[in-house]
Amino acid sequence: MSSFDHTEIDDVIHGRLRLGIMAYLSTASPAPFTELKQKVNATDGNLSTHLSKLEAARYVRIEKKFANKKPRTSVHLTETGRKAWIAYLRRLEDMIAETKS
Amino acid sequence: MSSFDHTEIDDVIHGRLRLGIMAYLSTASPAPFTELKQKVNATDGNLSTHLSKLEAARYVRIEKKFANKKPRTSVHLTETGRKAWIAYLRRLEDMIAETKS
């Protein structure tokens, strides 16, 4: 296996918006939907679509609650998600390290 | 601007296969088409498609020559490509650094 083999990169995480989501959640989970949206610079629809994809992979968990009668959505990084994030970073770091040696 | 803003990531480089190509070329330009194909684990058609996209952005230059009457294609990283690669890496490293602080 070559360090440059593109099929070794986790495609669920790699999409630009999902990468931003995973990176942010790795520092700030759980995050309110509205905060996440602003950090990754997404629209509501766009963020929802990509969260669904991450949820399907069980990398995130979406929680809907009511606070003062208002719905609040928060996004949690799961343990599976954290492991996938670490593996993804390692893979990327290996490839980048190779380009610097 | 947030470090997690997905629109700040160069989409031309970010696609998994193109990322593999750029990473490999940053260490070994010019590279023969056949060598590149093996390193990034792509088919002929797939590699050609993504090289065209990188060529359109002027990140790579494709050279076709004949050696012993056989056609040989080699792929060169351009100066523009090298700068874009460095900028891309910086952007990614900033985002990752933020997740570790």
Image (spheres, coloured by chain):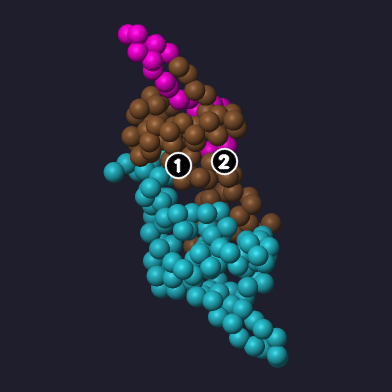
Chain colours: A cyan, B brown
Q: Amino acid at mark 2?
A: Val
Residue under the point 67% across and 72% down = A34
- Which residue is situated farthest in the left direction here? A1
Q: Answer above or below: position of A94 versus A85.
A: above
Label 2: which secondary element:
helix
Residue under the point 70% across and 90% down = A69
Image quadrant occupied by the N terminus of chain A: top left
Q: Answer above or below: position of B61 versus A96.
A: above
Residue under the point 49% across and 36% down = B50
Closer to us: B17 or A19: B17
Instruction: Say whether residue A26 is visible.
Output: no
Chain-order first, disc 1 or disc 2: 2
Q: Which residue is mark 2?
A: B12
Decide whether residue A38 is among the magenta residues.
no
- Which circle marks residue A11 in the picture? none
In percent of width and height, residue B27 lies at 41, 33
Look at the image and give the residue range highlighted in magenta: B65-86
Name the side, left or right, on which B55 lies relative to B21.
right
Instruction: Say whether residue A62 is visible.
Output: yes
Q: Which residue is mark 1?
A: B17
Label 1: which secondary element:
helix
Residue under the point 45% across and 42% down = B17
Image quadrant occupied by the C terminus of chain A: top left
Q: Chain for mark 1? A: B
Closer to us: B86 or B53: B53
Decide whether residue B85 is among the magenta residues.
yes
In percent of width and height, residue B101 lies at 52, 64
The local crowd at label 1, few if under 14, some if 14 to 19, many if 20 or more residues have their Cα within 10 Å, is: many
User: Looking at the rendering, which quadrant does residue B43 occupy?
Assistant: top left
Name the side, left or right, on which B21 lies relative to B38.
right
In percent of width and height, residue B72 lies at 39, 17
